[in-house]
Amino acid sequence: MGDCRGIRLESGFVGEVVVGAKGHGCWPDVVKGPIVAETLVPGVTVNEVATRYGMKPNHLSEWRNLAKKG
């Protein structure tokens, strides 16, 4: 198991992302939803949201696709 990285969402939610040995994060659904929602705001790009949370844009795009599928 890796260390934990604290995150803070604009909504005020504070949580932890568990980072594994290979550097991959385990993001809880309660955190993913608000991050994906930020990308749906007009004028906001996936790249800027991904950068804000220290993640790759393609990873965030995958979450968006999964959210659309339900």
Image: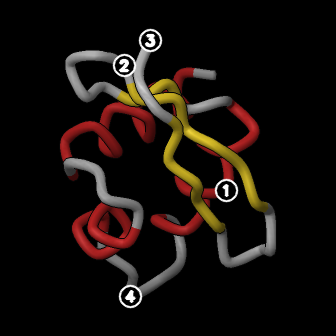
SS class, disc 4: loop
Residue 35 in the image, given as x and y percentages of width and height = 56, 56
Q: Amino acid at mark 3?
A: Met
Point out the frontmost of discs 4 and 3. 3
Point out the frontmost of discs 2 and 1. 2
SS class, disc 2: loop
Name the foreground residue: 61 vs 12: 12
Which label's residue is closer to the chain start, 4 or 3? Answer: 3
Which label's residue is closer to the chain start, 4 or 2? Answer: 2
Q: Quadrant of residue 50?
A: bottom left
Residue 48, compared with residue 22, is above or below; it is: below
Q: Amino acid at mark 2?
A: Gly
Q: Quadrant of residue 19?
A: top left
Mark 4 and mark 3: span between their CA atoms?
38 Å
Mark identifier at residue 43: 4
Name the foreground residue: 27 vs 37: 27
Residue 11 in the image, given as x and y percentages of width and height = 77, 74
SS class, disc 3: loop
Which residue is tagged 3? 1
Which residue is at 28% across, 16% downward? 21
Residue 65, compared with residue 54, is above or below; it is: above
Q: Amino acid at mark 4?
A: Gly
